[in-house]
Image: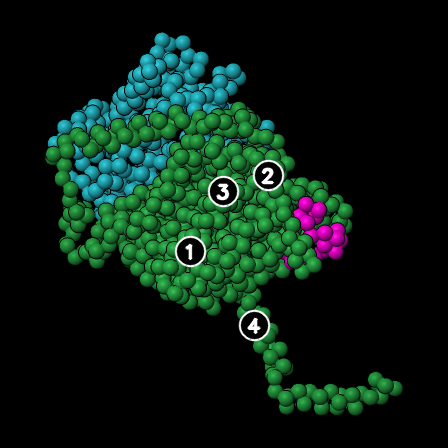
Chain colours: A green, B cyan
Amino acid sequence: MDMLTLILLLFLGGAIVTWLGNKLSPVVGDLLFLATIIIPAGMFFTGVTVGEVTHLHALGLTLTWGLTPLSYLFSMIVVGLGILLAIYAVPFMKGKQKTGAFYFNFTLSVMSMLGILVSKDWVSFFIFWEIMTWSSYLMVVLNGKDVQRVGIKYFVFSAIGAYAMLMAMVIMNSQLGSFLLADTFNNFQHLTTGNQILIPILLLVAFGVKSAMMPLHVWAPDAYSNAPMAYTGLFSGALSKMGIYGMVLVMVTMINQLPEGTLIRDIIAWIGGFTAAAATLWAITQDDGKKLLAWSSVGQMGYIIVGVAIGTPLAMLAAMFLVVVHAMFKGSLFMVVGAIEKQTGTTNFTEINGLIRKMPWTFISALISVIALAGIPPLAGFVSKWMLYEALIQNNNYILVILLFFASTAGFLYCYKFLHGYFLGQEEPEWAHVKEAPVAMVIPMVLLALGNFVLGTFPQLIFKPIDAAMQFAGYDATGGRLWGESVLFTEWGDVVTLQPILYAVLAVFVFFALFLWFKGTKGTRYVSTKDISTSGELPKEWENLTFKVNFMQPFERAIEPFLKRQIDKYYTAFGNGMEALFEFTRRIHTGNGQTYAIYAILFLALLLLFRVNLFG
Amino acid sequence: MEYILIKVLEAMATFVLAFIVGMTYGGVVRKITGRVHNRLGPPWYQNFIDAFKLFSKTRGIHHGAMHFLGAAFLMVTSVVSLMIIPILAPGGHAWYNSWFTNLNFNGDLIFLIYIMTFGPLGMAMGAGQTGNPNSSIGVTRGLSQMVGFEIPWVMALVALMITYKTTSIVDFMNIQRETGTWLMFANPFAFIAAVLAMLGMFRYSPFDIVGAPTELASGPVSENGGKFLFTMMSSGSVFTFAKLVLYVDLFMGGANNLIMLVVKTFLLYMIPVLYGIVSPRYRTEQAVRWFWGWPTFIGLLAILYAVMF
């Protein structure tokens, strides 16, 4: 048996064993879970080589598995994030219900994502895709809250995506006689023109659902925030990237061969840009950290979709870099929210105040990740933003670049809302008991946050595998042309050298921090956040003056006309309309034998009445 | 090592220049405002006196680590922007010209747009930790306003970028020297959009919603005194100077020597100042929508103009 099959089987077997072990004793379950994730992951990093292919014969079908440089890039995210979140998940799930189910679904998710990435034929692709959907669905409804609303929404949209993919698969197989990915891509020209348009669109719908592309995104904010936070990092960081993986495949193979390709690319890019802007505005209005991050994830996927859809080397590089970096900072941020939920029991901004002194490590990871998310240099988010804007301007997408600039600037608002909501403001006696999260939860999030710091100055560490993946996808080598050692270039000759900037930033920052700290240290004393002067009036001890409710109200007023429009409402209206239709059908199809008897009699009566006209 | 030392000295010279010019401008603006209000106004060096007073305070309070870091973050933005923006035009022959090169070739306009937001966000953290509600209110207003003026500002910049196929500030200055036409005449719409955005950027009335003395008691900077306020004040002066120089570089061909630089920046600075003196204050949503109105339309015209010609 070869390595890939073994790894996937280990995940599968491990999931079952962990589930059973957890029934035995929670400690056994925890250890088994860690082993289940870490051992195959270690084997993956050491034992798997890119390019090797295996065949599996089952049920009269031949399944083909193997890693390509493109899927290797994505699988690094899946496995890397999987390990860190697994370490985080053990203390997170301690003392919670349904730990066994959580471990089981977590492992299955990692397995299925890896499976999607190694699939070289549509059948195994689809099977793993469905396992992924199912395991994530079970995670979304794990806490048993809002199953009706959230779970069904996720399920309906996943089903739409799955059927679209299934339809595309069946058409391709009937026309081309092969389930192999490579065959379907290479023989794409042999399809009829109608099918050449239909198949990419069906596939883009399928992948668009998973990557939360508007208007297929409505499931995402609820599903992300309803799943356990230890899983949401994987959900938003890795699982949604499967949609991007599929989209890249479709774009570089099928769309490139179409004469209408440019139009489709432009449409998708605009959808992506709109997703980024609209989701950002919705993120600003949220009062729950989970919801805010969920909307923000949708928005970030918008940027990635724009990059993939534009598809110039620079745009692709930016999108792939953002795929990696987004997994890191969003993984870290969801861990932050999880830690806060664990320590305080709530994630609502209006309830928690001033955790900065109680959870300093959590705050530091949140701060670094948020700066990366906002795209501010010298952190990693900036690299992808810079490349994306340059790519758009050079590709003559002037209005789209303005839209993205708007989205990214508006992003600062929710970034500040997030940090202020949990960590800043007046410290209340109510939260005096809160302690820093367990070490096993802090280490993964700090590591991910530091990763953003490193990649912000040394992006070549990730550009190398991205470049390999892009060369596999048919691009020319970009190393030395668009990026170098800590340098970003464009074809116009624009340059950003990252190292001097990092050193300048650090030097100024350290100098002034030390200046502020050491100048007159003796005369500077700490006073509590209750000891403030608000317009010359001293607040009382029991007064809580923290500004939290309606935090972004002035801005929300400015964008009010936009916020009135919500695709969700249209879907609900559509759903209600359908329900009315079904209600009407139910009046006819009552399920009552007597009604049917009347129908039969009425039918006979009609026949008798019109027998002359009908039968002559 | 020697090279780095010289670089650091040059950076300090640039900083001192920006500090002195920025502080003087601050004082002069107070004087002008006073005269327009039919007052005598403080002397032009009042800001230096204030800064010295704040610097010499030996006692103060703080509300935690972020309170320190907030002011340091603010300084990062001012100083790094100053290092990236070319102070003098590359063609100048004055003996001190090479002093002000700094990091000019390491960043570009898009980088600048982002590093310019770093400080306000860091400052916002510091303001948040003080627990003063007025500070947080001021911050949310400031960020909202930033979303407002960023649109016409970016539109103006994109219009320039697509005309000249570069995003480097030095390249823009070279182009103006070679063609002999200032970009404010080459693409007037871009200049107008940028100047309208500038009104919000400098936060004079009617866009002084962040500090809003009568509503928010100075907003984000309240709860700060002594060394903290000194750092913020210096940062503000340096940043004002940096932004003015950027406008001069982009639209007025840069300056070959320091005297021209002072003249050009001062003239430009008078636009938001004089407009501000005679204006009342907008509400936040009015300010945001104002920027999405005519300024954005002119920005669109600028892009159209750039695409067509």
Give the amino acid type for the residue marked by disc 3 in the picture. Answer: Phe
Q: CA distance from mark 2 to mark 3?
A: 29 Å
Q: Earlier in the sequence, mark 2 or mark 4?
A: 2
The quadrant where residue B28 appears: top left
Q: CA distance from mark 2 to mark 4?
A: 42 Å
Quadrant into which the C terminus of chain B falls: top right
Placement of A40 over or under A494, stated as above or below? below
Q: Residue B270: where, in percent of width, then height?
A: 34, 27
Relative to residue A273, is residue B223 drawn left or right?
left
Q: What residue is at 45 percent from the left and 24 percent from the top?
A: B169
Would you say the residues marked 2 and 3 are in contact, meaning their CB atoms lie under 8 Å apart? Answer: no
Q: Which mark is residue A311?
A: 2
Q: Residue B73: where, in percent of width, then height?
A: 30, 34
Can residue B179 be seen in this snapshot? yes
Please name the predominant secondary structure of the magenta segment in the image: helix
Q: CA distance from mark 1 to mark 4?
A: 44 Å
Quadrant into which the N terminus of chain B falls: top left
Q: CA distance from mark 3 to mark 1?
A: 19 Å
Can residue B193 be seen in this snapshot? no
Q: What residue is at 60 percent from the left and 81 percent from the top?
A: A587
Would you say the residues marked 3 and 1 are in contact, meaning their CB atoms lie under 8 Å apart? Answer: no
The residue identified by callout 4 is A579
Are labels 4 and 3 assigned to the same chain?
A: yes
Q: Which mark is residue A45?
A: 3
Q: Tell me which segment is drawn in magenta.
A: A165-184
Give the amino acid type for the residue marked by disc 2 in the picture. Answer: Gly
Q: Which mark is residue A33?
A: 1
